[in-house]
Image (cartoon, helix red, strand yellow):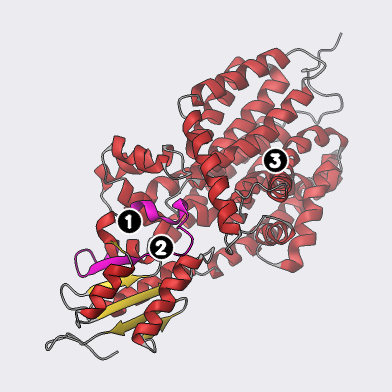
Amino acid sequence: MKRDHEPRPGAPAAPSRAAARAAALATAGIVALAALVRLREAARPPLGPDEIYIALLARLEPAAMLAAIRADVEQPLHFLVVWVWRRVAGEGDLALRLPFVAAGAAGVWASARLAAALFGPRRGALAALLLATQAVHIAASRTVGPDAFAWTFVTLAAWAAWAWTERRDRRALAGWTLAAAAALYTYWFSIVPLAAVAAWAAWRLRRGAGLAGWALGCAAAVALFAPQAPVLLEQLVRDARLAGAGARTGGLPPFGAAGLAEVARKLSASAPALVPLFASGAAAAFAARDDRRAASLAAAVALGAPLAMTALAHAGLRLFFENQAYVVTPFAAALVAAGVGGAAGRAARPGAAGRAWRAAGALACAALAVAQLRASLLRSPPAEAVALARATAWLAPRIAPGEPVFCAEPHAVLFLDWYLPGAARVRLLEVPEADAWHHSDAILAVPAAERADTAAWAAARAGGGRWWGIGNVHYPPYRTGREAAARMAAAAGAPVARFGRVTVWRGGVPPAASPADAP
């Protein structure tokens, strides 16, 4: 009697040793390409405010750092990576980003292994190529933050889940447990794609052996995360409450159709005209009967995670935003590689016809990869960081020692603290009558000594000395920042400089020997 985990009937024959070796060599070259592309992007300064936030907290001792992020909605793993790494490599912009470049390259390798397990080594290499050149994945891999690590762990977890459903391999079950727990310790949103994988595997195993083992593996992952679970629950309850309060004053909007459309665009080489092409390529992964079970796993994450976000957001849980949805990127790449690289099922044909279709599929994937790489190369660095860098460079020769610089947003405070340390008295102008800053907007890294209430603001102006003000448009546009910027504009009049989304004001009387006073 055939067991349910034996090779599926009609499955393509295992590739020859030469074909497998060629795919392995191609994958190695693609991973190297991925590392180089991400390294190039990581070398482009400056650090963004969210990256600076992580780096500043990593200066604390571990206990103090963990206590600080407990008040955020972040999980600790990538903070601990930065805490260790900065003691080895220092705090240069590129040095801080190197672990995330490595995690991104590892994610490309993991995507190749997942797609190879699902669709064979040739299409595994094509999936790696599509992910290596994907602009969203490249951007995440050059950024100090949770995404590069979390996406890699989720991909490894899915690979292990597939192996368990196919072979009942105990090592695969252990791999699922460890990768899932690591993903949870990196980013709370990993719950959503991991739940999609867990549900898919449970459905797959519902009538055969292995379901009990799968339940045990899932329970083990939860047990490993148990020490952090109360913290996460506290964070999510607080975050939902604050997000709901912010919604009443123009805070985070619910994730919905517009967010889904933007995700589809960015996963299609950032070209709206290519969305139907990428979507049809992914749908073609279901063309061959022997690929459908494998494609259903990739689709469970690629479609399930964004749709779950949308449903939960419209049910009132305002915890989701567009960037979280890009965890599906490796799974979308696997589907497109399977459909396009498999020539909608025709590549499995024997003889010359099959070889021709396989070559055509590979060329089509290469063309999509070129389109993606072009989109990545044309992609501008984050606008907020670039504007803050220009404003900081403009201010540097103009600020006299000890002059106060009032900031309307925490991001500007962190940027000045990082790139102009000690050059001025940087203060965050807080408007108590407005809504409070959301904790994920880097407010936790702004010490009490760098905060100024309206009384301190009035005293600084009454003193008669010169002061500077910086307002920057940050998403979401909290009323706190808007009102602080409005008060600076009312006190100073016309701005002395604008840099994209950053505005600089100057008020008061300059000292007699003010450096480079003219704008």
Tag 3 or tag 1, which sits nearer the N-term? 3
**Quarter where residue 397 is shown:** bottom left
- Which amino acid type is marked by label 3? Val
Instruction: Inspect the magenta stretch and tell me whether residue 479 lies in it.
Output: no
CA gap, disc 1 and disc 3: 37 Å
Establish if 100 lies above or below 62: below
Numbered label attached to residue 301: 3
Q: Earlier in the sequence, mark 3 or mark 2?
A: 3
Is residue 438 within the magenta segment?
A: yes
Q: CA distance from mark 3 to mark 2?
A: 42 Å
Give, as a three-letter code, the residue at label 1: Val
- Residue range highlighted in magenta: 418-445
Tell me the residue that label 2 is attached to: 432
Where does the N terminus fall, quadrant-wise? top right
Is 29 placed above or below 191 here?
below
Q: Which mark is residue 446?
A: 1
Number of disc labels: 3
Whether residue 30 can be seen here:
no
Closest to the camera, between mark 1 and mark 3, is: 1
**Residue found at the very far left of the displayed protein:** 513
Instruction: Give x and y (percent) for residue 189.
Output: 58, 41
Left or right for 375, reference 493 = right
| Label 3, residues with CA under 10 Å away: few <14, some 14-19, many ≥20 | many
